[in-house]
Amino acid sequence: MSPPNDNDGKNGLGRTVRLLRIISVLTFIPSLGINIAHGVIFNTVLPALGLLPHAFSVGLALYDLGWWKKLRGHPQYSIILEDPEEGKLSLLRLFVVTLSDVILGVSLLVCIVVSYIFIASNRYYYGYDPAEAILGTWGTIPYFINL
């Protein structure tokens, strides 16, 4: 007898997918604080620019978890991507969510690489500031977790 597949799509989101979506939402809070502090203290846009794809990823996670309808306050309205049969995911929704996850993951990865290049180039051209390197690097850790 094989173990039950919790990600088959028949019962909505699987436990693993739900957990990853919740982690995505929870990592946004420290990411916001660290990256805004880094941007204000060192007068730079990177790595705070990564907050844009991270925010879209959190929005997608809230939608995928079903919290979006609760936050809007109108649970009776549905979005076109939802299957009218409760508890099942439509193929269109699975395709759009998967494509969105891939695009957001690539954009987060680009932000991480560009941030590291920017932090290293500031060290080379303007002198070594360990606080900038530490704060900037810590600001990208939630992006790695969200990947």
Image: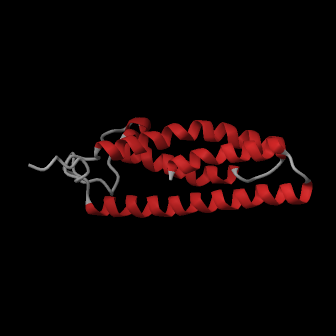
Give me the residue at 58% from left, 60% from top: 109
Q: Is residue 123 left or right of residue 102?
A: right
Q: Residue furthest left?
A: 1
Percent from the top left, x then y, of residue 18?
Answer: 35, 42
Give me the residue at 69% from left, 47% from top: 137
Percent from the top left, x then y, of residue 117?
Answer: 74, 61
Give me the residue at 42% from left, 64% from top: 99
Percent from the top left, x then y, of residue 10?
Answer: 19, 51
Q: Is residue 88 left or right of residue 98?
A: left
Q: Is residue 54 left or right of residue 67?
A: right
Q: How many callouts does the rendering have? A: 0
Give the answer, above or below, for where 120 lies relative to 77: below
Which sits in the foreground, 6 or 88?
A: 6
Q: How is the image coloured?
A: secondary structure
Q: Is residue 101 left or right of residue 89?
A: right
Which sits in the foreground, 133 or 142?
A: 133
Which sits in the foreground, 44 or 135?
A: 135
Q: Residue furthest right?
A: 126
Give me the residue at 43% from left, 46% from top: 61
- Residue 72, image quadrant: top left
Percent from the top left, x then y, of residue 11?
Answer: 21, 46
- Residue 91, image quadrant: bottom left
- Residue 69, image quadrant: top left
